[in-house]
Image (cartoon, rainbow, N blue to C red):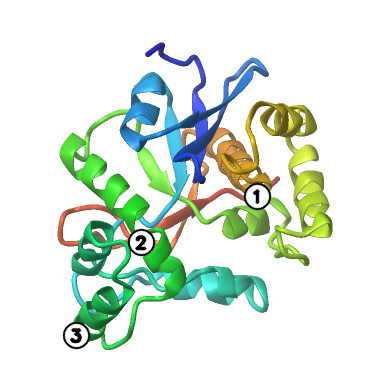
Amino acid sequence: MSVSRSKFVGVDGCPYGWFSVGLDNGGGYEVKAFKTFCRLLAHYAEAKLVLVDIPIGLPQRGEGRDCDPEARKLLGRPRGSSVFPTPTRPTVIQAAAAPEDYGGAAETEHCLAGKRISKQAFAIAPKIAEVDTVLLDRGASATPPVREVHPEVCFWALNHRQPMRSRKKTRDGEDERLRVLQGINPQTQEIYDSAIDEYLRKEVARDDILDALAAAVTAKLGWPDNLQTLPECPPKDNEGLPMEMVYVERT
């Protein structure tokens, strides 16, 4: 597999596997889809920063993660509902191994955390487990660094701390997010159209493109030292992974 020249990479899970937008310092870009997160990281081996919309840093029991309620609070209603509680690592492992057994995962999460795993978290448990395994295998000092974002937090920050008004799966929501990104990256529409043309919607959905693009723009604006975190001083999980969401404010 060839190695990309992109330095700033945004990633979102998609029906195909993983969708990425890569940006460089000279205005170049690429859009790509990968079956596995490991292949994605190999392609972007020379990147400066990879930001992915997936929980990184998993609780072991019911203590939860501070970044989740903080994100819900700053987004308010109704966008805050897009931030769901991150399940415990044992539940994620179980759900990934038995993706048809919601009841079993819900029971495990209830025993460990006092509540059932949400249907949204259960649906992406295989992807959470995939990224968790890759990051634990490669070690904390591996490059490129991989950090967690939540797209709605990214848009909130890029929109002068104002959450998006419309749902991203609506035409109004799509146009709203494109306008925010276009004001920062003039190639936004070109990048979006390129991805629309290259991939079928059953492979990469429209909102997957928007989310990955927001993460890529955040990576480029935030590198090397402009990223902010939720919470301000993120704790680490039992395996040493930070429990955080990163974002950058538009100047």
Depth-wise, is mark 3 or mark 2 nearer the camera?
3
Q: Which residue is mark 2?
A: 233
| Residue annotated with mark 3 | 111
Q: Please, what secondary structure does the residue beneath circle 1 have? A: helix
Instruction: Indicate the quadrant containing the C terminus: top left, top right, bottom left or bottom right.
Output: top right
Q: Position of residue 205 (x, y in %)?
A: 63, 46
Residue at figure coordinates x 21%, y 40% from the top left? 140
Quadrant housing residue 144: top left
Q: What is the crowding at mark 3: few (fewer than 14 residues within 10 Å), some, or many (at least 20)? A: some
Can you say whether 147 is above or below 70 in the image?
A: above
Asked if residue 76 lies left or right of residue 237, the reply is: right
**Residue shown at the point (40%, 67%) measured from the top left:** 121
Foreground pick, 111 / 44: 111
Q: Secondary structure at mark 3?
A: helix
Identity, as a three-letter code, of the amino acid under mark 1: Asp
**Disc 3 to disc 2, C-alpha distance:** 29 Å
Q: Which numbered disc, 3 or 2, marks the residue that appears first in the sequence?
A: 3
Residue situated in front as seen by the camera: 15 or 209: 15
Q: Position of residue 112 (x, y in %)?
A: 19, 81
Residue designated by label 1: 207
Q: Amino acid at mark 2?
A: Cys
